[in-house]
Image: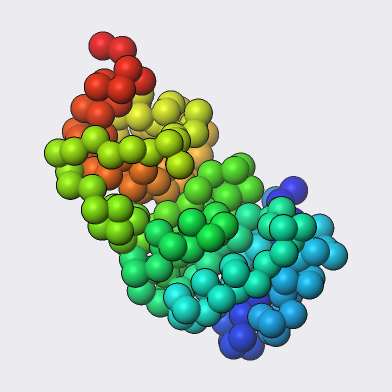
Amino acid sequence: MIRILLAARSPVALAGLEALLGRRDDFQVSGSSGDLAALPGRLAREEADVVVVDVDTGEAALALLDGLEPEARGPALLLLVERPELWASEALRRGGRGVLPRRVAGGELVAAVEAAAAGLVVLHPVAADGVTAARGAPAHRIPEIDEHPLTPRELEVLEMLAEGLANRTIAERLGVSDHTVKFHLASIFAKLGVRTRTEAVTQGIRRGWIML
């Protein structure tokens, strides 16, 4: 069971999140808040695995992250923002677990919650482009990624890419949804500073992660 705390200034947005995530048998919406200023205090008191926050703007997302005390950083924070490609890199650097567009599809949000609860960094493909650009890593260059190394699951996905498997086949092997596979790929591409599956596999081979 994944325990979720929801927060949004807009009552409509909050109701939409509750309706979408609250109907899942494997999710438990443990609380909700329309007061983002009070959210840091709630995080320190309440038990939650994932916190989904509709913060409207990237500036508000960064301000929220900066206001969190160390003891409030336990749950994985998924941030829903406008223009996530502009804010994803800095939001992850300041402690966010994932950055998604405010109008993210329902299936993608569900997959993002599951991935965040599993300890993954969640990047929507749009946001991943922003992380790659912010790092200034051209596709042909191998960037330094010590700050955000690939997770064991991401390495597993990378190996399947090397086998030439399609997203649907990868999803079937891992027992996850297609959306979750897309999140894995977006995270891998962002961390490696690449834009294609071939470039990701090439870097995996060069780094000794994939044996041919």
The answer to whether residue 28 is left or right of residue 91 is right
Name the residue at the right extreme.
45
For the point 49% across and 34% down, the residue is 151
The residue under the point 60% across, 60% down is: 77
Q: Would you identify the image quadrant in which residue 69 lies?
A: bottom right
Among the 4 quarters of the image, the one containing residue 67: bottom right
**Image quadrant in which you'd find residue 20:** bottom right
Query: From what the image shows, is residue 11 above or below residue 138?
Result: below
66 sits left or right of 137 in the view = right
In the rendered image, residue 178, in percent from the top left (x then y), is placed at 41, 45
> Can residue 21 be seen in the rendering of this structure?
no
In the rendered image, the residue lying farthest to the left is 140
User: In front: 48, or 142?
Assistant: 142
Quarter containing the C terminus: top left
Q: Is residue 98 above or below residue 171?
A: below
Q: Position of residue 13 (x, y in %)?
A: 57, 82
Residue plotted at (59% across, 88% down): 10
Left or right: residue 9 compared with residue 138:
right
Q: Is residue 86 above or below residue 146?
A: below
